[in-house]
């Protein structure tokens, strides 16, 4: 199983970016999916999370600016980011809890994509 992210880059403050993540491989079911980020010198933190049923959870710092969505048929999760701030600069990681069969669930991570917001 592999998670592949795309969509990072350099954007000016108050700009927008959309991150996408696609899961591939021998997948029985994907449960929670999410995005985390890690800025230089800081710990990795949760940005947004979405259940298979579509319930969402956001970090306070991104509420009202970021929107997480998923397509269960395509095994993808997106993060739409608007009104970006320099403090949003970080490496963003896709995360998913994936069942390979009815019994076992594993925690998978993407390779990360850099988002840089200039002031």
Image (spheres, rainbow, N blue to C red):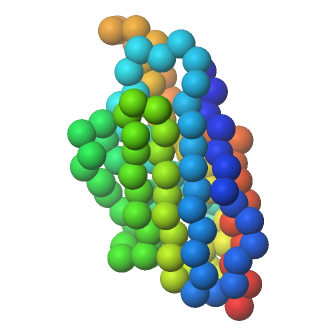
Question: In what quadrant of the picture does the C terminus appear?
Answer: bottom right
For residue 84, side relative to residue 96 (left or right)? right
- Horizontal and vertical percent position of residue 12: 69, 84
Question: Which quadrant would the N terminus be assigned to in this image?
Answer: top right
What residue do we see at 41% from left, 56% from top?
68
Asked if residue 66 lies left or right of residue 64, the reply is right
State which quadrant residue 4 falls in: top right
* Residue 51, picture quadrant: top left
Residue that appears at 50% across and 29% down? 107
User: Quarter-wise, where is residue 99 in the image?
Assistant: top left
Which residue of the protein is positioned furthest toward the bottom in this rendering? 119
Where is residue 112? Give x, y as percent.
Answer: 69, 48
Q: Position of residue 15 (x, y in %)?
A: 60, 82
What residue lies at 57% left-to-right and 43% top-to-bottom? 21
Q: Which residue occupies 57% across, 62% down?
A: 18
State left or right for residue 20 relative to residue 56.
right
* Residue 20 sits above or below residue 98 on the image: below
């Amino acid at each position: 199983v592999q998670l592949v992210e795309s969509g990072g880059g350099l954007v000016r403050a108050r700009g927008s970016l959309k991150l996408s993540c696609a899961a591939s491989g021998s997948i029985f079911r994907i449960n929670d999916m999410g995005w985390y980020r890690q800025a230089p010198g800081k710990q990795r933190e949760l940005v947004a999370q979405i259940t298979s049923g579509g319930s969402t959870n956001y970090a306070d710092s991104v509420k009202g600016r970021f929107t997480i969505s998923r397509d269960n048929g395509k095994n993808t999760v997106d993060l739409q980011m608007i009104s970006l701030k320099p403090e949003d600069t970080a490496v963003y990681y896709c995360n998913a809890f994936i069942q390979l069969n009815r019994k076992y669930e594993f925690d998978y991570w993407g390779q990360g994509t850099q988002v840089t917001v200039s002031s």
